[in-house]
C-alpha cells in the first residue's frame, strides 16, 4: 500500500504499451479542490500499467466529468492506493474532510 497526502486527485487513463492491451491508470495529485476548473498542474503523478479496473472504497465526494472522462475526488486528507499486481486491480481508499 502507498499513502499520499493530497487535497484532491484526478483519476484518468491512457493507452498501454499494446494498443489492444490493458490501459495505464493515472492518478494526479493536487493541493486544492477542483483542479480541473483552474487548469492546475499536479504536484505529483503516479501511473500503474496494465490495470484491469480501479475500485473506490469509503470515499464520499467523488465526481465523474463526462467532458474529460475523469474522476475527481475532493476534500482528501490522504489517499491510500492498494495495487494488486496479481489480478491488476487498484483499490483506492483514504480519508476525506467533508
Image (cartoon, helix red, strand yellow):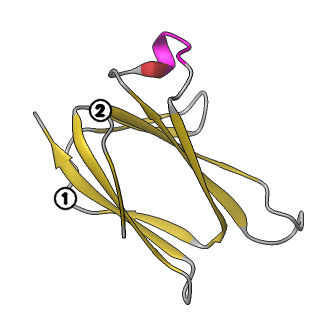
SS at circle 2: loop
Q: Position of residue 37 (x, y in %)?
A: 47, 13
Pick the residue in front: 55 or 41: 41
Please tell me how crowded label 2 is: few (under 14), some (14-19), or many (20+) other residues with Cα within 10 Å. many
Please, which residue is most extreme toward the bottom here? 86
Look at the magenta stretch and give its main secondary structure. loop
Q: Residue at x 60, y 27 (%)?
A: 67
Q: Magenta segment, which residues?
A: 36-40
Query: For residue 97, what is the image quadrant?
Result: top left
Q: Tell whether position 80 is magenta.
A: no
Q: Position of residue 2 (x, y in %)?
A: 38, 63
Please, which residue is most extreme toward the top here? 38
Q: Is residue 78 left or right of residue 12?
A: left
For mark 2, what is the residue? 74
Q: Residue at x 61, y 31 (%)?
A: 68
Q: Residue at x 19, y 58 (%)?
A: 58
Residue 36 disc label: none
Q: Position of residue 56 (x, y in %)?
A: 33, 60
Q: Position of residue 81 (x, y in %)?
A: 39, 62
Q: Is residue 64 above or below residue 41?
A: below
Q: Residue at x 41, y 37 (%)?
A: 9
Q: Tell whether position 38 is magenta.
A: yes
**Mark 1 vs mark 2: which is more N-terminal?**
1
SS at circle 1: loop
For mark 1, what is the residue? 58
Q: Is residue 13 left or right of residue 79?
A: right
Amino acid at each position: 500500500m502507498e499513502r499520499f497526502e493530497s487535497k484532491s486527485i484526478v483519476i484518468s487513463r491512457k493507452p498501454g504499451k499494446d494498443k489492444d492491451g490493458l490501459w495505464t491508470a493515472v492518478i494526479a495529485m493536487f493541493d486544492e479542490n477542483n483542479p480541473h476548473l483552474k487548469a492546475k498542474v499536479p504536484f505529483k503523478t503516479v501511473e500503474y500499467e496494465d490495470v484491469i479496473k480501479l475500485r473506490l472504497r469509503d470515499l464520499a465526494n467523488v465526481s465523474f466529468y463526462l467532458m474529460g472522462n475523469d474522476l475527481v475526488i475532493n476534500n482528501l486528507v490522504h489517499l491510500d492506493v492498494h495495487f494488486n499486481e496479481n489480478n491488476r486491480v487498484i483499490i483506492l481508499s483514504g480519508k476525506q474532510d467533508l
